[in-house]
Amino acid sequence: MELFRSHCYSTIYCNSLWSRFKLATLNRLKVCHNDILKRLLGLPRWCSSSLAFARNGVNNLDVIRRHSVFSLNNDITCSRAHGLESSEFSTIWPRLQCHSLTKFICAVYLSPNSSDNVKFFDYLTTKVEHI
């Protein structure tokens, strides 16, 4: 069972970041996951997958995905970097932190009629150099 856990859990590592997939593709992945466990246990294909997972203390694909998403949500903190924001330009600077990694995102609104691009890029340059 350890081989199944380590191999199957690691192959779907980062599944919490999956954003583009078809439901049919996910369902095929579930069927493959179920079939692999049944083959390892020597069970026929028609027997209950949920019973096989429960009896052997192994998480099914839905549980693995749910734990992965929950773990990702707990690992990443998001806050605003108010010190980087400007009253002159409509900017918001979210700060994403995960362990030792910090990422800043600059969300900007510039009016289509604004012609003060040089001043704005100077502002951005000073903030990026500050980070």
Image (cartoon, rainbow, N blue to C red):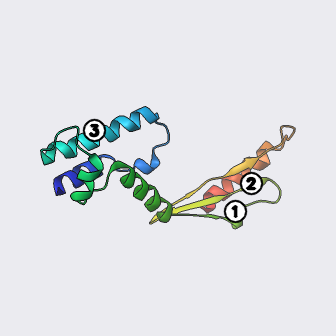
Question: Which residue is located at x 83 percent, y 37 percent?
Answer: 112
Q: Position of residue 1 (x, y in %)?
A: 17, 55
Using the rendered image of the protein, determine whether residue 113 is visible from the camera's viewpoint.
yes
Query: Alpha-carbon distance for marks 2 and 1?
Result: 9 Å
Write down the residue under mark 3.
32
Q: As shown in the figure, which amino acid type bears the numbered disc 1?
A: Leu
Q: Is residue 39 above or below residue 100?
A: above
Write down the residue under mark 1.
84
Write down the residue under mark 2.
91
Q: Position of residue 99 (x, y in %)?
A: 45, 66
Counting residues from the start of the chain, the first of labels 3 and 2 encountered is 3
Q: Secondary structure at mark 1?
A: helix
Marker count (numbered): 3
Q: Quadrant of residue 28?
A: top left
Question: Which residue is located at x 21 percent, y 38 percent?
Answer: 45
Q: As shown in the figure, which amino acid type bears the numbered disc 2?
A: Thr
- Answer yes or no: do the residues labelled 3 and 1 have beta carbons within 8 Å? no
Question: Which residue is located at x 77 percent, y 45 percent?
Answer: 118
Query: Alpha-carbon distance for marks 3 and 2?
Result: 47 Å
- Tell me the quarter of the image containing the C terminus: bottom right
